[in-house]
Image (cartoon, rainbow, N blue to C red):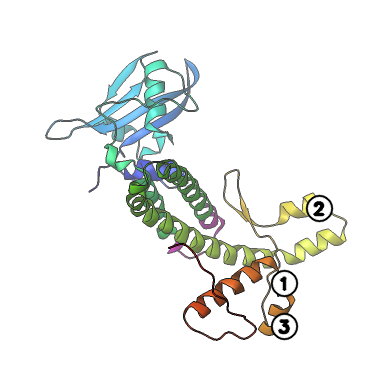
Amino acid sequence: MSDGFEFWRARLADPSVPFPETGLPLGYWKQKRNDQGGARNVPIGVWRDESEAGALVVQFGSKAGKVWLLEPDKILDWHENPWWLGQAVTYDDYIAAFETGEWPDHSPARIGHNKPPEDSITGGDQVESVAALLEARLADPADSQDWADAVANLRDRLRSIATDLTEMRKAEESGPKETLAAIKAKYTPILDRAEALGKRAAERLADYLTKQREAVADKIAEATAAGASPEEINEMLPRAGTGKRRVGMRGRKVATIKDYALTLHYFANDPAVVKVVQSLANKAVKAGGNVPGVEVEKKETAA
């Protein structure tokens, strides 16, 4: 069931997601202003009150200065679209700025009547929100840098959420053993979805970046011949994403086995191969099989 905060979550995951052309999206925002009070970042909260009608509330400012409750209709008269809301911020950071007038890097959680429903901000919900945006982007043609940047940003965000969820899972798995099955059922579908979608995104990005690299191959060759430095050549290589971890193509060697028997002979004495072969031989002998090169002996064990 929709709680109205979907667009705000989308902007948290990917700031490049465009604002809707009309209406005021629910959420928590940081607006940059430069007026008589000087340069400042103002917290703005948009939510629906608890009345049956669910009237729209737009709260502007902080307790450290002055708080205004703005009339949504007048705002829409002033602005044709809600771009003016600014940057999407977490609820906790919004509350910290509203209470103190200062924006923290990480503020402690606070409870408030206007907080999005708890069940809508779980790790699974975060994965689903970002996954839905990423799937929509992957359904579009890979024909622009904007597309590549959006896919890379969303993939990075998805991986970050999955990493946090993996840590949460490990912490929960340190508890009673009888809870392990429930923990696995709770996290595995979410993490599997994030991993599968991340791989799809990586494949599409690889195709796009390969084509872009082919398009600039001549320029790179000319620059190399002209004595360009490795750093200058690196800057010419296509990349995707606008965050710290931009995606680029990197070469790696991949082996394709052409003669299985010859390759197996090469690795015959590798401890990892010996361990696998020993395990296979044990299973075959236990099942009554006759394995060439194996001497069967009976060992007594306590039972």
282 part of magenta stretch: no
Amino acid type indicated by mark 2 = Pro
- Where residue 3 sits, quadrant-wise, is top left
Q: Is residue 9 visible to us here?
A: yes
Mark found first going from the N terminus, 3 or 1: 3
Residue labelled with disc 2: 230
The residue positioned farthest toward the left in the image shown:
52
**Magenta stretch?**
138-149
Measure how far apart labels 3 and 1 are at the Cα level: 13 Å
Contact check, label 3 and label 1, Cβ < 8 Å:
no
Residue labelled with disc 1: 269
Amino acid type indicated by mark 3 = Leu
Q: Is residue 19 visible to us here?
A: no
Quadrant of the drawing holding the C terminus = bottom left
Q: Classify mark 3: residues with Cα within 10 Å, few (<14), some (14-19) or many (20+).
A: few
Mark found first going from the N terminus, 1 or 2: 2
Measure how far apart labels 2 and 3 are at the Cα level: 40 Å
Residue at (70%, 69%) from the top-left corner?
270
Residue labelled with disc 3: 262
